[in-house]
């Protein structure tokens, strides 16, 4: 019979991994799958697809734990994060490290089934994930580093299919930096007052009163760069229609957050990005399978 203590720990581990909230997994997954589907001409090998889907879930979960370990001194002082398992002592650091190590090992075991180039590239991804939690201490641009960490899967996915790196995945990687900077700035708006009080830096603070203009510019740059990758691969009108629709919806998100700048609206704007990334994948898949 499972004890009440064990159930308490399992719930805490679930919260540590963000199991109830998978928006972050989707935001990490979409650029990876954009690249994977384009590299595979719209029909990726099932085994490679499964490896990247599972690996994305595992690494995002491990990354959340890494972030919580790094931020355990900050989180108790932020309204949004004060109930995280390390912040409220439901788990200790050793327990968190054990879970993070197990998840990372499982993810690396999946990567080992891919080609040598992709295995080597995975170490860059690990480094980016490890650096990200500490950037907010000395730079206003942790969102940019998050975009690099979340976009690196696009480079790995391309190499897993084609055993090379070309301009196309690099453009997808760069596009994701702008996309992630935008949606994570919207997310950071929820914590802006708390961050100012405790000395944590973010793009939401850096852009100040120009934050909504900066968000629009980031989304436009994202669309231009992703469109550049699509042009190199000669994607057709279905993709372009999907990209145009998505950009308009992203700009509408900015307008909505600007009109009603509350925590709830900012979170809904962040969530919308997780849905819209999937819409882009849908249009890529349709276009390449016509």
Image (spheres, rainbow, N blue to C red):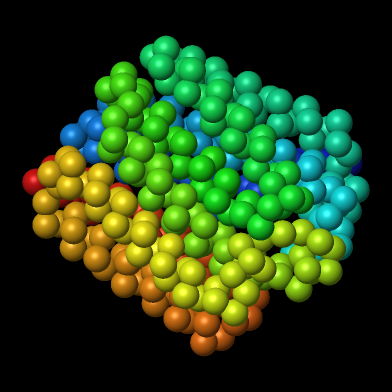
Specify whether 115 is left or right of 183.
left
* Residue for point 62% across, 74% down: 208
Q: x and y percent of residue 176 in the render? A: 42, 49
Specify whether 23 is left or right of 154.
right
Specify whether 86 is left or right of 66.
right
* Residue for point 46% across, 50% down: 177
Q: Residue furthest top?
A: 116
Could you tell me how many numbered marks the image carries?
0
Q: Quadrant of residue 57?
A: top right
Q: x and y percent of residue 136 in the render? A: 71, 52
Q: Compared to 51, does 191 lie above or below?
A: below
Q: Is residue 116 visible?
A: yes
Q: x and y percent of residue 251 in the render? A: 39, 73
- Quarter holding the N terminus? top right
Q: Residue furthest bottom?
A: 259
Q: Compared to 4, does 180 lie above or below?
A: below
Residue closer to the observer: 52 or 226: 226
Residue closer to the observer: 258 or 111: 258
Q: x and y percent of residue 275 in the render? A: 41, 60
Specify whether 286 is left or right of 93.
left
* Residue for point 40% across, 64% down: 219
Q: Is residue 7 visible?
A: no
* Residue for point 23% across, 61% down: 242
């Amino acid at each position: 019979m499972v004890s009440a203590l064990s159930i308490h720990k399992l719930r805490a581990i679930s919260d540590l991994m963000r199991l109830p909230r998978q928006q972050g997994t989707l935001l990490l997954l979409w650029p990876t799958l954009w690249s994977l589907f384009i590299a595979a001409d719209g029909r990726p090998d099932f085994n490679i697809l499964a490896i990247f889907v599972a690996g994305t879930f595992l690494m995002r979960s491990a990354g959340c734990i890494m972030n919580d370990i790094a931020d355990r001194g900050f989180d108790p002082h932020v309204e949004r994060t004060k109930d995280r398992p390390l912040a409220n002592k439901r788990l200790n650091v050793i327990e968190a490290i054990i879970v993070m190590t197990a998840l990372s090992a499982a993810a690396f075991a999946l990567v080992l089934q891919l080609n040598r180039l992709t295995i080597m590239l995975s170490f860059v991804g690990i480094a980016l994930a490890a650096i990200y939690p500490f950037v907010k201490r000395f730079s206003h641009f942790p969102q940019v580093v998050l975009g690099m960490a979340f976009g690196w899967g696009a480079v790995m996915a391309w190499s897993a299919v084609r055993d090379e790196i070309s301009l196309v995945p690099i453009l997808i990687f760069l596009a994701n930096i702008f996309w992630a900077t935008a949606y994570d700035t919207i997310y950071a708006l929820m914590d802006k007052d708390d961050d100012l009080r405790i000395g944590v830096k973010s793009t939401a603070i850096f852009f100040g009163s120009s934050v909504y203009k900066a968000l629009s510019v980031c989304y436009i740059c994202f669309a231009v760069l992703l469109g550049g990758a699509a042009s190199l691969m000669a994607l057709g009108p279905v993709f372009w229609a999907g990209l145009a629709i998505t950009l308009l919806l992203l700009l509408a998100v900015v307008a909505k957050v600007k009109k009603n700048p509350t925590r709830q609206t900012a979170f809904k704007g962040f969530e919308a990005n997780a849905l819209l990334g999937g819409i882009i994948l849908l249009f890529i898949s349709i276009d390449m399978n016509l």
